[in-house]
Image (cartoon, rainbow, N blue to C red):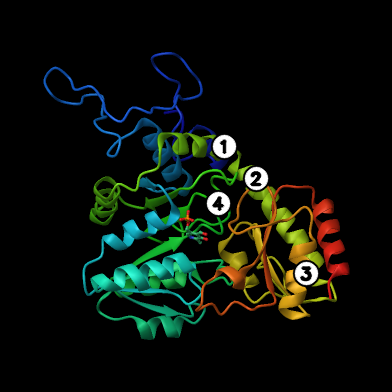
């Protein structure tokens, strides 16, 4: 182990969870596909590995790295972001209650409404920009305040420290889905959260070629033991190859995030000044309603933005149809810029404006991105 807690995040991103292979001297780790491991003559497993669902060297390395990046004590990696979220909810008991954001990622809301409701775990979806609303929804059974900031797709930011205080003063835990920000941009555990979770499919993976999720816990406590149990007994583990791919992506994360954020800021500024655009949602804009809180709790303003067209849905669809460099696709956090008419894919309960397009700012040259969107806007109604 070359790193310690004092290392900067760039150093952790390169070294944490990586070790030179003792047997061969290989600097880059191999992929351990074996599902089973040899027992010692006495029947034990001195080398620490028994069976692939419980333990795998690639997954252990990834968990070490992801825990280090957020300053956590422990981490558990999953086969998707929703599997990670589900593992957190699986630690709840029938009768427990969760407070989640009204504009929560719809997959998380669906988990609560359609799966966990059946097990008598209830959820209230509230506007978390209003602390009085969160307070009035707390009950003696509230066990988790689920925080997502910035939110999807309106990029609204909520006050993490204030929500943590509210949670802790009522005996609940504060859990942050930090997927939109990444550990480079926002550090929920340092702001008091008990747990941080990610869809590693997004910025952490960075290439749109691996699905994954992780739960990072501030403490190796009984709550984390429940997450570990959900991982090993539930079995939603990532493959060794997926873990290896993620480990390959992490060293460049700090530098990719810087570029994603720079490009998002420039795109937001360009769109903000465009006459066919009626609103831009990006916390990096000084006039944005989330700017003040974002400045307080984020080191950059993130790689995601959204905007609304004066001409409503037809104009939004026309822009999405015209762009050349932006790919029309859902998801985010990859090297290529994506554009999405979000209302079309956010389910029947969606309140997302029909005029809204969401952008994941990729790593192309910013002048090319601006030229592309500018041409599409010029051609739109
Ligand atoms: N959390 C957020 C904020 C997301 O946007 C997503 C997916 O878009 C997820 C969790 C779920 O991740 P996955 O698709 O890896 O299951």
Residue under the image location 44 percent in, 25 percent down: 19
* In contact (CB < 8 Å): disc 4 and disc 2: no
Residue 26 in percent (x, y) is at 48, 17
Looking at the image, residue 354 lies above or below residue 29: below
Residue 131 in percent (x, y) is at 46, 81
The residue under label 3 is 318
Numbered disc 1: secondary structure: helix
Which dot marks residue 202? 4
Earlier sequence position, callout 2 versus callout 1: 1
Q: Is residue 172 left or right of residue 330?
A: left
Numbered disc 4: secondary structure: loop
Q: Is residue 61 left or right of residue 49?
A: right
The residue under label 2 is 256
Which is closer to the viewer, label 1 or label 4? 4
Q: Residue furthest top?
A: 24
Q: Nearer the viewer, residue 159 or 319?
A: 319
């Amino acid at each position: 182990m070359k790193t310690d807690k004092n290392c900067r995040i760039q150093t952790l991103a390169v070294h944490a969870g990586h070790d030179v292979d003792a047997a061969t001297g290989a600097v880059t780790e191999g992929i351990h596909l074996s599902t089973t491991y040899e027992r010692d003559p006495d029947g034990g497993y001195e080398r620490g590995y028994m069976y692939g669902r419980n333990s795998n060297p690639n997954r252990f390395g990834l968990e070490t790295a992801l825990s280090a990046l957020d300053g956590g004590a422990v981490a558990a990696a999953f086969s998707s972001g929703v599997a990670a979220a589900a593992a957190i909810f699986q630690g709840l008991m029938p009768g427990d209650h969760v407070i989640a954001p009204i504009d929560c990622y719809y997959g998380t809301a669906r988990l609560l409404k359609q799966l966990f409701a059946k097990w008598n775990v209830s959820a209230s979806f509230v506007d978390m920009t209003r602390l009085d609303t969160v307070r009035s929804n707390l009950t003696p059974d509230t066990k988790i305040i689920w925080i997502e900031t910035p939110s999807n797709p309106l990029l609204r930011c909520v006050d993490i420290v204030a929500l943590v205080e509210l949670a802790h003063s009522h005996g609940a835990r504060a859990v942050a889905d930090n997927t939109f920000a990444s550990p480079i941009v926002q550090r929920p555990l340092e702001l008091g959260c008990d747990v941080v979770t990610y869809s590693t499919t997004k910025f952490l993976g960075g290439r749109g070629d691996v699905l994954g999720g992780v739960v990072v816990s501030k403490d190796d406590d009984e709550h984390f033991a429940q997450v570990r149990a959900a991982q090993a007994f539930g079995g939603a583990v990532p493959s060794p190859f997926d873990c290896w791919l993620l480990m390959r992506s992490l060293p460049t994360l700090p530098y990719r995030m810087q570029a994603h954020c720079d490009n998002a800021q420039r795109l937001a500024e360009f769109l903000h000044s465009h006459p066919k655009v009626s609103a831009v949602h990006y916390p990096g804009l000084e006039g944005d309603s989330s700017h003040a809180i974002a400045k307080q709790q984020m080191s950059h303003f993130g790689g995601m933005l959204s905007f609304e067209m004066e001409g409503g849905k037809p104009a939004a669809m026309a822009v999405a149809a015209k762009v050349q460099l932006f790919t029309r696709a859902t998801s985010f956090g990859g090297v290529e810029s994506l554009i999405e008419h979000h209302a079309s894919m956010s389910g029947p309960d969606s309140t997302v404006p029909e005029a809204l397009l969401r952008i994941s700012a990729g790593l192309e040259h910013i002048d090319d991105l601006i030229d592309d969107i500018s041409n599409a806007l010029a051609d739109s109604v």
